[in-house]
Image: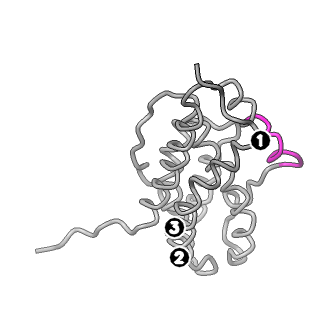
Protein backbone atom coordinates (compact mmCIF):
# COMPACT_ATOMS: atom_id res chain seq x y z
CA UNK A 1 0.00 0.00 0.00
CA UNK A 2 1.28 3.42 -0.95
CA UNK A 3 2.01 5.87 1.86
CA UNK A 4 -0.44 8.74 2.44
CA UNK A 5 0.60 12.21 1.26
CA UNK A 6 3.18 14.16 3.22
CA UNK A 7 1.03 16.42 5.37
CA UNK A 8 3.41 19.36 5.24
CA UNK A 9 3.46 19.17 1.44
CA UNK A 10 -0.28 18.85 0.77
CA UNK A 11 -1.06 22.54 0.56
CA UNK A 12 2.10 23.25 -1.39
CA UNK A 13 1.25 20.45 -3.84
CA UNK A 14 -2.28 21.81 -4.29
CA UNK A 15 -0.98 25.36 -4.69
CA UNK A 16 1.57 24.31 -7.31
CA UNK A 17 -0.82 22.04 -9.19
CA UNK A 18 -3.48 24.76 -9.45
CA UNK A 19 -1.29 27.83 -9.91
CA UNK A 20 -2.01 28.25 -13.63
CA UNK A 21 -5.72 27.58 -13.20
CA UNK A 22 -5.92 30.02 -10.30
CA UNK A 23 -4.16 32.69 -12.35
CA UNK A 24 -6.54 32.07 -15.30
CA UNK A 25 -9.59 32.52 -13.05
CA UNK A 26 -8.15 35.68 -11.49
CA UNK A 27 -7.49 37.08 -14.98
CA UNK A 28 -11.01 36.25 -16.19
CA UNK A 29 -12.65 37.90 -13.19
CA UNK A 30 -10.33 40.93 -13.22
CA UNK A 31 -12.39 42.31 -16.11
CA UNK A 32 -15.34 42.93 -13.79
CA UNK A 33 -15.37 46.44 -12.35
CA UNK A 34 -16.82 45.92 -8.89
CA UNK A 35 -17.53 49.63 -8.43
CA UNK A 36 -20.05 49.41 -11.29
CA UNK A 37 -23.49 48.07 -10.39
CA UNK A 38 -23.92 46.24 -13.71
CA UNK A 39 -20.44 44.69 -13.61
CA UNK A 40 -20.85 43.72 -9.98
CA UNK A 41 -24.22 42.10 -10.73
CA UNK A 42 -22.58 40.13 -13.56
CA UNK A 43 -19.70 39.16 -11.24
CA UNK A 44 -22.10 37.89 -8.56
CA UNK A 45 -24.16 36.02 -11.16
CA UNK A 46 -21.06 34.31 -12.50
CA UNK A 47 -19.91 33.34 -9.02
CA UNK A 48 -23.39 32.08 -8.15
CA UNK A 49 -23.39 29.79 -11.21
CA UNK A 50 -20.20 28.14 -9.97
CA UNK A 51 -20.94 28.27 -6.26
CA UNK A 52 -24.28 26.49 -6.60
CA UNK A 53 -22.63 23.47 -8.18
CA UNK A 54 -19.52 23.49 -5.99
CA UNK A 55 -21.23 23.76 -2.63
CA UNK A 56 -23.69 20.98 -3.43
CA UNK A 57 -20.76 18.58 -3.94
CA UNK A 58 -18.20 20.00 -1.48
CA UNK A 59 -20.66 20.51 1.38
CA UNK A 60 -18.68 23.26 3.17
CA UNK A 61 -19.18 23.82 6.88
CA UNK A 62 -20.10 27.47 6.25
CA UNK A 63 -21.84 27.69 2.88
CA UNK A 64 -21.91 31.05 1.12
CA UNK A 65 -24.74 30.25 -1.30
CA UNK A 66 -27.34 31.89 0.99
CA UNK A 67 -25.16 35.01 1.14
CA UNK A 68 -24.76 35.37 -2.60
CA UNK A 69 -28.48 34.65 -3.02
CA UNK A 70 -29.23 37.52 -0.61
CA UNK A 71 -26.80 39.86 -2.40
CA UNK A 72 -28.41 39.11 -5.75
CA UNK A 73 -31.91 39.58 -4.29
CA UNK A 74 -30.85 42.93 -2.84
CA UNK A 75 -29.97 43.94 -6.40
CA UNK A 76 -33.32 42.61 -7.73
CA UNK A 77 -31.52 39.78 -9.49
CA UNK A 78 -32.63 36.17 -9.61
CA UNK A 79 -30.36 33.35 -8.59
CA UNK A 80 -29.01 31.78 -11.80
CA UNK A 81 -29.09 28.07 -12.52
CA UNK A 82 -25.90 26.41 -11.32
CA UNK A 83 -23.41 24.94 -13.74
CA UNK A 84 -23.08 21.18 -13.59
CA UNK A 85 -20.34 19.37 -11.72
CA UNK A 86 -19.78 15.64 -11.53
CA UNK A 87 -19.63 14.18 -8.05
CA UNK A 88 -17.19 11.26 -8.03
CA UNK A 89 -17.89 10.84 -4.29
CA UNK A 90 -14.21 10.66 -3.34
CA UNK A 91 -12.99 12.29 -0.15
CA UNK A 92 -9.85 13.77 -1.70
CA UNK A 93 -11.87 15.30 -4.55
CA UNK A 94 -14.25 16.93 -2.06
CA UNK A 95 -11.30 18.34 -0.10
CA UNK A 96 -9.83 19.73 -3.33
CA UNK A 97 -13.10 21.55 -3.97
CA UNK A 98 -13.05 22.85 -0.40
CA UNK A 99 -9.44 24.01 -0.80
CA UNK A 100 -10.47 26.23 -3.73
CA UNK A 101 -13.69 27.42 -2.06
CA UNK A 102 -12.13 28.24 1.29
CA UNK A 103 -9.16 29.89 -0.38
CA UNK A 104 -11.52 32.10 -2.35
CA UNK A 105 -12.67 33.65 0.93
CA UNK A 106 -9.21 35.20 1.25
CA UNK A 107 -9.54 36.89 -2.14
CA UNK A 108 -13.12 37.88 -1.41
CA UNK A 109 -12.00 40.00 1.52
CA UNK A 110 -9.80 42.07 -0.80
CA UNK A 111 -12.47 42.30 -3.49
CA UNK A 112 -15.13 43.46 -1.01
CA UNK A 113 -13.20 46.70 -0.60
CA UNK A 114 -13.63 47.42 -4.32
CA UNK A 115 -17.44 47.15 -4.27
CA UNK A 116 -19.21 50.48 -4.67
CA UNK A 117 -20.82 51.92 -1.53
CA UNK A 118 -24.46 50.91 -1.19
CA UNK A 119 -24.08 47.60 -3.00
CA UNK A 120 -24.51 44.39 -1.01
CA UNK A 121 -21.35 42.52 -0.14
CA UNK A 122 -22.31 39.70 2.22
CA UNK A 123 -20.83 37.06 -0.11
CA UNK A 124 -17.46 38.75 -0.54
CA UNK A 125 -17.32 39.74 3.13
CA UNK A 126 -17.77 36.14 4.32
CA UNK A 127 -14.19 35.75 5.46
CA UNK A 128 -12.78 33.22 7.88
CA UNK A 129 -13.14 34.12 11.51
CA UNK A 130 -10.04 34.40 13.66
CA UNK A 131 -8.10 31.18 13.20
CA UNK A 132 -10.56 29.84 10.63
CA UNK A 133 -8.12 29.54 7.74
CA UNK A 134 -5.54 27.85 9.98
CA UNK A 135 -8.21 25.45 11.26
CA UNK A 136 -9.21 24.62 7.68
CA UNK A 137 -5.60 23.94 6.75
CA UNK A 138 -5.19 21.66 9.76
CA UNK A 139 -8.35 19.76 8.80
CA UNK A 140 -7.03 19.46 5.23
CA UNK A 141 -3.73 18.08 6.54
CA UNK A 142 -5.58 15.59 8.77
CA UNK A 143 -7.77 14.44 5.88
CA UNK A 144 -4.68 13.97 3.73
CA UNK A 145 -2.93 11.97 6.46
CA UNK A 146 -5.93 9.66 6.70
CA UNK A 147 -6.66 9.62 2.98
CA UNK A 148 -4.36 6.91 1.76
CA UNK A 149 -3.36 6.09 -1.78
CA UNK A 150 -4.67 8.39 -4.48
CA UNK A 151 -6.01 11.00 -2.04
CA UNK A 152 -3.70 13.80 -3.20
CA UNK A 153 -4.40 13.06 -6.87
CA UNK A 154 -8.13 13.23 -6.12
CA UNK A 155 -7.65 16.50 -4.21
CA UNK A 156 -5.78 18.03 -7.14
CA UNK A 157 -8.58 16.91 -9.48
CA UNK A 158 -11.16 18.49 -7.19
CA UNK A 159 -9.29 21.78 -6.92
CA UNK A 160 -8.78 21.86 -10.70
CA UNK A 161 -12.49 21.14 -11.20
CA UNK A 162 -13.38 24.08 -8.92
CA UNK A 163 -11.13 26.48 -10.82
CA UNK A 164 -12.45 25.18 -14.16
CA UNK A 165 -16.02 25.77 -13.00
CA UNK A 166 -15.24 29.35 -11.94
CA UNK A 167 -13.49 29.91 -15.29
CA UNK A 168 -16.52 28.61 -17.18
CA UNK A 169 -18.82 30.80 -15.09
CA UNK A 170 -16.70 33.90 -15.77
CA UNK A 171 -17.31 33.66 -19.49
CA UNK A 172 -20.48 35.40 -20.59
CA UNK A 173 -23.34 33.12 -21.53
CA UNK A 174 -24.02 33.00 -25.29
CA UNK A 175 -26.94 35.14 -26.44
CA UNK A 176 -29.43 33.45 -28.73
CA UNK A 177 -29.53 34.91 -32.22
CA UNK A 178 -32.83 36.32 -33.38
CA UNK A 179 -34.23 35.82 -36.77
Q: Is residue 136 magenta?
A: yes
Q: Which residue is mark 2?
A: 39
Q: Which residue is mark 3?
A: 24
Question: Element under label 1?
Answer: helix
The answer to whether the residue labelled 1 contacts the one labelled 2, judged by CB atoms less than 8 Å apart, is: no
Q: Residue furthest left?
A: 179
127 with respect to 66 (left or right): right
Q: Quadrant of residue 134?
A: top right
Residue for point 61% across, 50% down: 100
Q: Mark 1, mark 2: which one is toward the viewer? A: 1
Question: Element under label 2?
Answer: helix
61 with respect to 150 (left or right): right
The answer to whether the residue labelled 2 contacts the one labelled 3, judged by CB atoms less than 8 Å apart, is: no
Find residue 29 and report its horizontal and vertical position in percent. Answer: 54, 70
Q: Which residue is mark 1?
A: 8
Q: CA distance from mark 1 to mark 3?
A: 26 Å
Q: Main secondary structure of the magenta part?
A: helix
Amino acid sequence: MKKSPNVSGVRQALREATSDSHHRVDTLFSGYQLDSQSHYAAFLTAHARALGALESVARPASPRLPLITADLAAMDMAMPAPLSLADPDRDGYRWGLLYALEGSRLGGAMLARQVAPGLPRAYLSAVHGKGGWVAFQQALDQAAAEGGEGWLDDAVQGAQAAFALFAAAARPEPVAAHG
